[in-house]
Image (cartoon, rainbow, N blue to C red):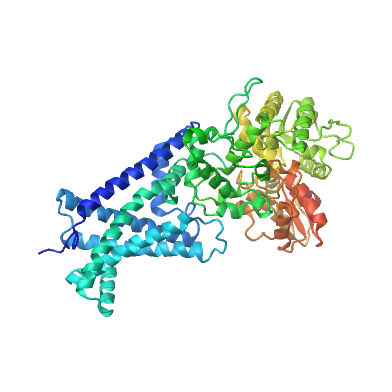
Amino acid sequence: MGATRPLFWNTNGEGIMYLWALVSFLIFLIGTVKKIRQWGQGRSRSFDNLGNRVKAFISDLSMHNNQIFKGTFRRLMHLGMFYGFLILLIGTAMIGLQVDFKIPIFYGIKYLVISFLMDIFGLLATIGTLMAAYKRYITKRDHSDYTFDDGFLLFLVFAILLTGFLLEGLRIYVIGDIWAVWTPVGLFLSFLAKIFGLSVKTAHSIYAGLWYFHMIIGIGLIAYIPYSKLFHMIASSLNIILKPTSSLGTLTTADLITEQEYDTGVARLKDFSKKQLIEFDACVSCLRCQKGCPAYASGDPLTPRGMIQDFKRHANSKNIAETFEIPLIDTIISKETLWSCTTCGLCEVKCPLNMEHIKRIVDLRRSLATMETGYPLEVHTKFDNIALKGNPWGLSFCLDEKEYLGGGTPAPLLSKVKQTDILYWVGCYGTFDSRNLKVSQAMIKILEQAGVNYAILGKEEKCCGNTVRRLGNEKLFRQLALENIQTLNRYEFKTIVTHCPHCFHTLKNEYSELGGQYNVMHHSELIADLIKSGKIKPQKATKRKVTFHDPCYLGRYNSIYEAPRAVLTSIPGLELIEMKKSNRNMAFCCGAGGGRIWIKDKEKEGISSLLMKKVLRTNSDLLASACSLCLLTLTKEVQNSEKVIECQDIAEIVYNSL
């Protein structure tokens, strides 16, 4: 007789098993259909290249791409559980084919190989489950966010695996399986049974009861999936397949806005897109987004993970028709929580499942634009000033008062020269804020010294609308954008250069939605090119240590990391010291983005002060910035610091070295 083993040994519960499987599948189906109906209530959103998306997902899943499964421990944990259950599922399906369809699969070498693989991968799944329990309940001290479902699922999965191995060990112990060496875990457990003196009669009895328990919880797990955290296996897979191909922080494209119709935001669950609703079920509550959130770190009420879980509980609380019509703001999420977000994007970088937190928050903010008490008073004032004068302070531009060169020679105006190679977009802060005005002056002096053909718009330049849009005022943003595009299209130029990453991001990536297609450079890129080409040459040596703060909208949003560093390292004697665990795409926010610079910070310790602590740990005497908002907030922190440190924009640092 060839190698095999008796199926349904010592039990007559085959009929009960199939009946329970049918019931479990129906329960699973009902829960899954309910979830799909929930997702279907959202707004439609088109996705291209679905075939390629699925192929990429399968590749990422099979290899456990480290961009999704971040961290060696977590990656190995998921690998063990994923491939463990996959092999167990395949093996169980093959047994079913033999029992139900009389296909002789479980014989000979095929049986031995299948048995061995199921044992080894079942063991890996068990280890992965124990690793998950260790990570959740031993290394994490804060258990306040854990639910009953979290612990119950781990217990259930572990119980299924353990009882499966125990059944195997008891069978080998009783019948003396000559092929037991191919099931090493079961063989080991049979040795334990022998060592402890377990009688054959007792082993028979234990096996019979344990088989029913194993069958009930194993098949019952299928029914439990749609009602538990395990449903993330389906939802997160869909979310990864539908992940955005656009750059981080890309916002929902608003519909056409008119005076009569203005409904671009999210006020109820039904206003979210289907993809955003899927995200609620995809979230595994891993807390990585929360750990990276500067607002949460500063004591603000925002936690990206908490927001998603609150929406998920709300979506599951009542019947779909009623739940999806309930207003969200000040019911499920407070205005204060919405205003806490700096739109820095660190939460999205840290999230392994491609959650679009920024898009969700801005969509919610947009719904406040039609409410009289939607925005804080100081924000309403900024909107009024921008609508009236084109800048947040409501100031008038007077060229005679704003001579950027400082020596009586104004910068060339594009309205007079008509065409230029470089259009220097000075920005609101570069024009009207006294601290950033020094950056504009340094930048123009660099352009002059390099012999660059440049010009500015002067009073024709209006706020780009970046902060306006992040605060949710889409109508005002479009008004500003269209006016600026109309102005820009009147002139001939090759490249727009700006020293503010917020302006850079908006001009480069968002004006294109409205027909404004321009070649846009950040001033760090231009300065780096000028140094590389020899048009300017830093010569004055300085023995100083400098640390560079990566602005969110320059780094995470646009992946510009090397240009500012190349500029700093080109200066003789300047030593660049990186902030540990807070540089490049993991850089901590200054706290000014997303409209926070216009909102009064009531917290004792703001986001910028937390960043300053990271800066001071480098023991640098110079803090380099490449952003108007970062420069403003960090300069204030430097002034409040007890240590001697100076904050300058890279344009100022370069000009002082020429």
Q: Which residue is drawn at 71% across and 39% down?
A: 498
- Residue 240 in percent (x, y) is at 46, 44
- Write down the quadrant of residue 644 in the picture: bottom right
**Residue placed most toward the observer, 291 or 35:** 35
Q: Quadrant of residue 163?
A: bottom left
Q: How many labels does the image show?
A: 0
Locate residue 124, reporting x and y percent.
36, 63
- Is residue 331 shown to the viewer in this render? yes
Depth check: 7 or 464 in front? 7
Residue 296 as seen in the image, left or right of residue 140? right
Q: In the image, is residue 52 above or below residue 515?
A: below
Residue 497: quadrant of the picture: top right
Up-down relation of residue 308 to residue 581 (above or below): above
Q: Does residue 234 appear to the left or right of 414 in the view shown? A: left
Q: Residue at x 77, y 30 (%)?
A: 384
- Residue 97 location (% of width, % of height): 20, 50
Q: Is residue 72 above or below residue 174?
A: above
Q: Can residue 575 be seen in this view?
A: no
